[in-house]
C-alpha cells in the first residue's frame, strides 16, 4: 500500500481553505491545516492542525517549518488572504500595506520556507484573484487587493520558473466569486463548487503548464 501524499493548506479553518482540505482528503491526501485559530470543521477533516500561525510573521513561519520537520509536502496551497476596499480620495495606505503582507508577501515567505520539503513532482497552488489581472481591470478601485494579488501573480510566476528545474509546478488560481465571510457571503458560487474546480486545476497542474493563471472553471486568465 503506497504512503499517503501530504497537502499543507494555509487559512484552512474556514471558507475555501476548509473546502480544499475536504477535497484533498477525499483524494486520499493527509491534510495538514495551518491557521491562526482552528475550527471544529477543520479538526474533523485534517490529519494534523497547526494553529497559532500568522503567515505574515517570520518567527511564526519558522515555527511552522520546525513543526513540519521530516514531513514531505506533496502539495502546498497558499490560501490565507484578506480583502479590503480603498477608493480614490480616501485611500488608506495602511490597509494596502496589510493586504500586501497577507496576500503577496506571506505566500512567498511560506513557499520559500517550505520549498526544501517539496519533492520532485510536488506542487504549489497560490489562491489569487481575477482582480489581480491588470488586463481585466475595467472597474477600478480595490487598490490594495488588486495590487497585492497582481504581486502574488508575479511572485508565483517567478517561483514557477525557479522551481521548474527541481520538478515542482506552480499555479496561480482564481477561486471565482465565492460565498464566504470575506465577501459577506454575497458571492455567486459555493465554497464547495469553487474548491472542486480548484482541485481539478491542481490535478491538471504539471511542468508543461506551470506558471499559469487559471479560473477555477478552467479558463486561462489574462495577466
Image (tube, grey):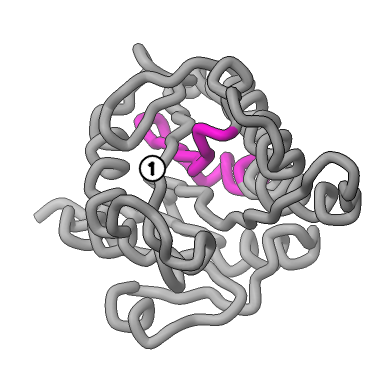
| Crowding at mark 1 (Cα within 10 Å: few <14, some 14-19, many 20+) | many
Q: Which residue is drawn at 46% across and 47% down?
A: 76
In this rendering, is residue 14 above or below 208?
Answer: below
Picture coordinates of residue 107 (x, y %)? 63, 46
Q: Name the residue under label 1.
A: 176
Between 169 and 107, the residue placed more toward the observer is: 107
Extreme bottom residue here?
Answer: 40
For residue 123: magenta?
yes
Picture coordinates of residue 21 (x, y %)? 33, 62
In this rendering, is residue 152 above or below 15?
Answer: above
Extreme top residue here?
Answer: 208
Q: Residue at x 34, y 73 (%)?
A: 46
Q: Can residue 33 be seen in this view?
A: no
Magenta region, residue range: 111-131
Q: On the picture, is 218 further left or further right than 59?
A: left
Q: Residue at x 32, y 37 (%)?
A: 216
Q: On the picture, is 25 further left or further right than 77?
A: left
Amino acid at each position: 500500500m503506497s504512503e499517503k501524499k501530504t497537502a499543507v493548506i494555509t487559512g484552512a479553518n474556514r471558507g475555501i481553505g476548509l473546502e480544499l482540505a475536504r477535497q484533498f482528503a477525499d483524494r486520499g491526501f493527509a491534510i495538514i491545516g495551518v491557521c491562526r485559530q482552528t475550527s471544529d470543521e477543520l479538526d474533523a477533516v485534517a490529519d494534523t492542525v497547526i494553529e497559532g500561525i500568522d503567515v505574515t510573521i517570520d518567527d511564526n513561519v519558522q515555527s511552522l517549518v520546525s513543526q513540519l520537520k521530516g514531513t514531505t509536502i506533496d502539495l502546498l496551497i497558499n490560501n490565507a488572504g484578506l480583502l479590503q476596499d480603498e477608493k480614490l480620495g480616501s485611500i488608506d495606505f495602511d490597509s494596502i500595506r496589510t493586504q500586501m503582507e497577507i496576500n503577496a508577501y506571506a505566500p512567498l515567505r511560506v513557499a520559500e520556507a517550505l520549498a526544501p520539503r517539496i519533492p520532485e513532482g510536488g506542487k504549489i497552488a497560490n489562491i489569487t484573484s481575477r482582480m489581480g489581472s491588470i488586463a481585466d481591470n475595467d472597474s477600478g478601485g480595490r487598490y490594495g487587493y488588486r495590487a497585492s494579488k497582481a504581486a502574488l501573480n508575479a511572485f508565483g510566476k517567478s517561483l514557477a520558473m525557479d522551481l521548474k528545474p527541481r520538478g515542482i509546478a506552480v499555479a496561480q488560481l482564481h477561486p471565482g466569486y465565492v460565498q464566504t465571510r470575506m465577501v459577506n457571503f454575497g458571492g455567486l458560487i459555493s465554497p464547495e463548487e469553487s474548491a472542486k474546480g480548484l482541485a481539478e486545476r491542481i490535478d491538471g497542474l504539471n511542468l508543461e503548464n506551470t506558471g499559469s493563471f487559471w479560473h477555477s472553471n478552467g479558463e486561462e486568465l489574462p495577466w
